[in-house]
Structure formats: structure tokens, C-alpha cells
Image (cartoon, rainbow, N blue to C red):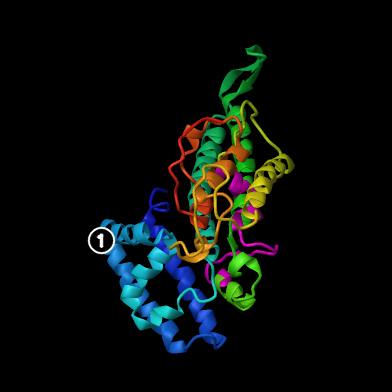
Amino acid sequence: MAAIWAPENRFRIWFEIEAHACDAMAELGIIPKDAAQAIWEGGKKAMAALKAEPAANVEKIDAIERVTKHDVIAFLTWLGEFIGPQSRFVHQGMTSSDVLDTSFSVQLTQAADILIGDVDRLLAALKKRALEHKDTLTIGRSHGIHAEPTTFGVKLAGHYAAFARNRARLVAARAEIATCAISGPVGTFANVDPRIEEHVAAKLEGRRVTIFGYDVRVASPKARACERGITMKDKSKISTPDLRTTVFEAQYPEDMVRSDPTGFKCLECGFVQPCGFFQPGADARGWKFCPSCAAEIMRFARDPEREPEETEVVDQHAHHIGTVRCNKPKEKY
């Protein structure tokens, strides 16, 4: 499980997404076919180097990111050193969310496979012991006191049935999050042919996003809720409709912050970012709120009762939409 969330695995998935997209572009005549082949050859060398010396190569990518302030561009810069001139065709027409969200989905499916396998082994053990103790008498309990007699096997059979239902929920969640979104900036397909997304989805054994938008986690509320750590408080269960409502209650103010008109000065902390401020990718745009304050507003919208000091880690998507940080004091709301 730890290996799934390690940087090396994330970068390997990023490369596969980019390379499969290049294959589709080559078939459509968007980029030369020899370029797609060179991307695979150079990329395999990069992945071999990453596997041989993971710490050193991850540090190289991090060092580039400290300059570019953009994780995907940092990775592509590092990857380009292995591919050579043909690297100019990598990521053509795509946006960072195409890579980040699809990669996150792949990681979740990998993690789900481990959990499902663990539950399968637990079910086998429960079934074995339930049959073994089907005639082992024990006292039943009701309201915490002795009740009618039962067998230990019956008790284990009840746990088996419960975990069988839990397994079905895990399988459903895995199917829902196995999503691929390669639709270009703001999800319009204006710069990326939909057939590219279809090709990548087939290679990654995922399904295509069927909604307008470019955030996979919006299309999969269960996973987005888990990522955001929505507080359940004392509730032992929450229904799917309630969960979806909770998620989109958090998504609405986030979308409103992102839709705010372009400006030059953060209304929260006074951070000034002029047009032309050195920042590659989508982060080159002006902001009404600086990315740091925007992320804090989004976190506060998700859980108003949480103290700002407890939510210092910016989630993956908020990080990639803006990494410029201000020196705003950590005062409480």
C-alpha cells in the first residue's frame, strides 16, 4: 500500500498517461509516429533510472519544481532529459488535471485492489471458522445481558455476511473511481481529441468521464469525500445521497473561488501578483485571491469547525492550480 502512494509510482503513472496519449495522437496524425516511439524509448530509460535510484531522481524533480513552481512541468522537464528533442510532443494540448486526476484515480484503484484482496482473505477465514464452530454452543446477548443460547458459528456467519456487504461496497467504489479524464484545459476537448481519452482509458482499464468538467474527483464523490477527510462526527453511517450532498456543498464555494474575476491583488492578505509574474502553466493567470488564501478559503468551506493550523496541507488539486505562497499570518478565523 505504501508503494502505491510513493512518488516513484505516481511518476510512473504520469509517464504512462503521457505516453499512451502520445500513441493516440500519433495514430490520429497529430504528432509524428517516430516521436511517439522515441517517447516510449526515452521514457523507459527514465523509469529505469527512477527505479534504480528513486530518492535521487525524485529529488531532481523536486529541485526543478522549486524553480518552476509546477509539479507536472517539473516532471516533464526531467522526463525530457531522457527523451531528447522529441519530448516537445509530450503533453501536447493537455492540461495538468488530465494527468493528475487520472493518475489519482489509478492509484485509488490500485489501493482498492489491495483492500478487496484483504477482505477476500478475511471472508475465507470467517467462513472456515463459522463452519468449524457451527455446533459450538455459546450464550446469546441482548441489551448487553444473557439471552437465548446460540452458536459461535452463527455469530461468525453474521460477521461474514456483514463483510460480504462491505466487499460489495468496495467493488462499487472501485468501479466508480476507475475513471479517465483527458479533455484538455477546462474540459472542453478543444485541444484534445476525445479519441485520445478513449485510448488512454482503454490502456489504463478505466472508464471515461461522462460529465462536462475536468476534475475526476467531482465525478467520484465517494473518493473525493475520503480525500477531503469529511468529518462524520458521531455518525456511524452516512447514506450515499447525504454523502454526495456533503461533497458538493464543499465543491460549490470552491468553484465560486475559482470562477472569481481575474485580478492583481489578494483581497485577503494583500499579496500582489502582476500580469507576467513568472509562473508556468495555468498558474500564470492573475488571481483575485492568491493561491494560498484561495486554498485556505476552500479548506474552511469544507469544514468550518476545523482550526486553520490543522489544515496546513493543501490538497492535490489546490496545490496544482496555484503554488505561489504568501506570508499571511496564521491567524484564526
Magenta stretch: give its range. Answer: 201-228
Extreme-right residue of the structure = 241
Give the camera-side residue of 75 and 34: 75
Residue designated by label 1: 53
User: Is residue 286 in view from this perspective?
Assistant: yes
Residue 202 shown in magenta? yes
User: Which quadrant of the figure contains the C terminus?
Assistant: top right
Residue 107 shown in magenta? no
Q: Amino acid at mark 1?
A: Glu
Secondary structure under tag 1 reads loop
Q: Relative to 136, does residue 75 appear above or below in the rendering?
A: below
Estimate the x, y position of residue 207 in percent, counting from the top left.
Answer: 62, 65
Estimate the x, y position of residue 6 in percent, counting from the top left.
Answer: 38, 53
Give the camera-side residue of 189 and 253: 253
- Identify the residue at horizontal 61%, vertical 41% (top origin): 166
Estimate the x, y position of residue 315 in percent, counting from the top left.
Answer: 51, 47
Q: Quadrant of residue 43?
A: bottom left
Give the camera-side residue of 37 and 183: 183
